[in-house]
Image (cartoon, grey):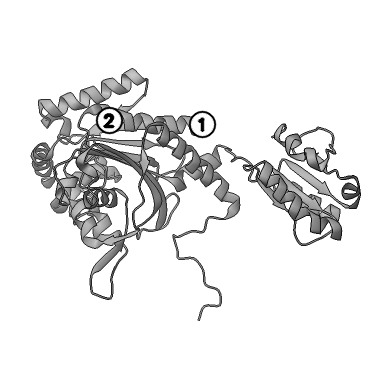
Amino acid sequence: MRKHIQAIRGMNDILPERLALWQQIEHTARAVLASYGYSEIRTPIVEVTELFKRSIGEVTDIVEKEMYSFADRHGDSLSLRPEGTASCVRAAIEHGLLTQPQRLWYQGPMFRYERPQRGRYRQFHQIGVEVFGLTGPDIDIEVILLTARLWQRLGLSGFRLEINTLGDSAERQLYREQLVAYLQSRADQLDADSQRRLSTNPLRILDSKHPETQRLLADAPRLLDVLGSETRAHFERLCAGLDAAGVRYQINPRLVRGLDYYNRTVFEWITDDLGAQGTVCAGGRYDGLVEQLGGRATPAVGFALGLERLVEILEQSGFTAAPALDVYLVAVGERAELAAPALAERLRDALPNLRMQCHCGGGSFKSQFKKADKSGARFALILGDDELDRAVIGVKDLRGDSEQGTPSQAELASYLAARL
């Protein structure tokens, strides 16, 4: 028997000192999404396994190797969700949301059985967007601009945007045949993973990082060369819209994405600050997925961004979250310990958004003041016998050079409001 039970490998606790940064990102994302008119949706973390087999694709690495699946007591196969799009589509169909265009967003944990490494975990968190019912490149442009605005609001400027088009199903099939024909005659030069994919999911070979495979792909047929006029026009208008908005991008003809349901527009935001796991946000169109999962034909586009990777990038950049506390109330002596909770409640009544912690557990003034400073609070409120006798309270600015104030308890709320 284990002496100490620990978290599962690749599934990490997020402790309070780091959570403030997570919450800052989530708060910023929520504000940006609201400014674009997107509505939040929440779906279960457990779905029937068939949902992901039909959406992601049975011959993808996710379904073949990475899902956490189990049989329930009735023998039905269930899975922890490995991504959020399929669940959103299922919910939209089930609840009749697709009678008109929908702009939705979600956040929460996803699960994949992968080898844990920097930027890649078995439980990871995403914020995602799904738009249903809009066909034009204008909505593709909007979701990309939304992500660009989020980076701006977070103070991030080191990402590069890569875009591509995967065409429609007929165009992809034609290209798949050309690619397979080219690679089959060179199969002995491919890495083992690409050799396996040649007969199951050949487009994923384009995403290989193996140097020899990359060399072979340099002369491979290009998907862009088999696109029809309609797909070309869609992609050209996408590029023109990004140009008009001043968003810089690179066209990457090998960008394919790891999920089978994508068509036409695909994109990724990439950083060089995370090593091999450089993709921070990725998405694209999936116009056939709703029908594939039993709904009526509905165009759709979306993206997901990885919170763990964003947190790491922001930590590297020196980004600091807003202090968790505005005020720490120091109470010295038995009388102050009894009076402090009531004083704190009066302050909370007067200043509903005040973030305040009231010291509990006694201790000397020195030890309490040290805790006040360590808490990160802007102000320490000092309450002792002398302050009680005079009906005042000491206010010490812990982050500035201003002199200590002693407002009356009746004036304390207005005193703090003017300084926070």
> Residue 8 — which label?
none
Which is nearer the eye, 344 or 167?
A: 344
Callout 1: helix, strand or loop? loop
Q: Does residue 160 appear in the picture of this structure?
A: no
Callout 2: helix, strand or loop? helix
Q: Does 239 sit left or right of 342 as displayed?
A: left
Q: Does 29 sit left or right of 363 as displayed?
A: left
User: How many numbered badges does the structure rendering display?
Assistant: 2
Residue, far bottom: 1
Check disc 1 and report the residue beneath it. 155
Query: Up-down: is 35 above or below 45?
Result: above
> Residue 139 — which label?
2
Residue drawn at x 35%, y 47% as measured from the top left: 41
Neighbours of disc 1 within 10 Å: few (<14), some (14-19), many (20+): few
Query: Up-down: is 155 above or below 296?
Result: above
The numbered mark, 2 or 1, whose residue comes first in the sequence reads: 2
Q: Does 373 sit left or right of 69 as displayed?
A: right
Image location of residue 244, percent across then percent down: 32, 18
Q: Does residue 189 appear in the picture of this structure?
A: yes
Image location of residue 406, percent across then percent down: 85, 39
Q: Does 144 sit left or right of 265 as displayed?
A: right
Residue drawn at x 75%, y 53% as measured from the top left: 342
Which is nearer the eye, 33 or 86?
A: 33
Label 2 to label 1, Cα distance in Å? 24 Å
Residue drawn at x 78%, y 45% as measured from the top left: 381
Can you say which quadrant of the picture contains the C terminus? top right
Image location of residue 389, percent across then percent down: 91, 49
Q: Amino acid at mark 1?
A: Gly
Q: Amino acid at mark 2?
A: Ile
Numbered disc in front, either 2 or 1: 2
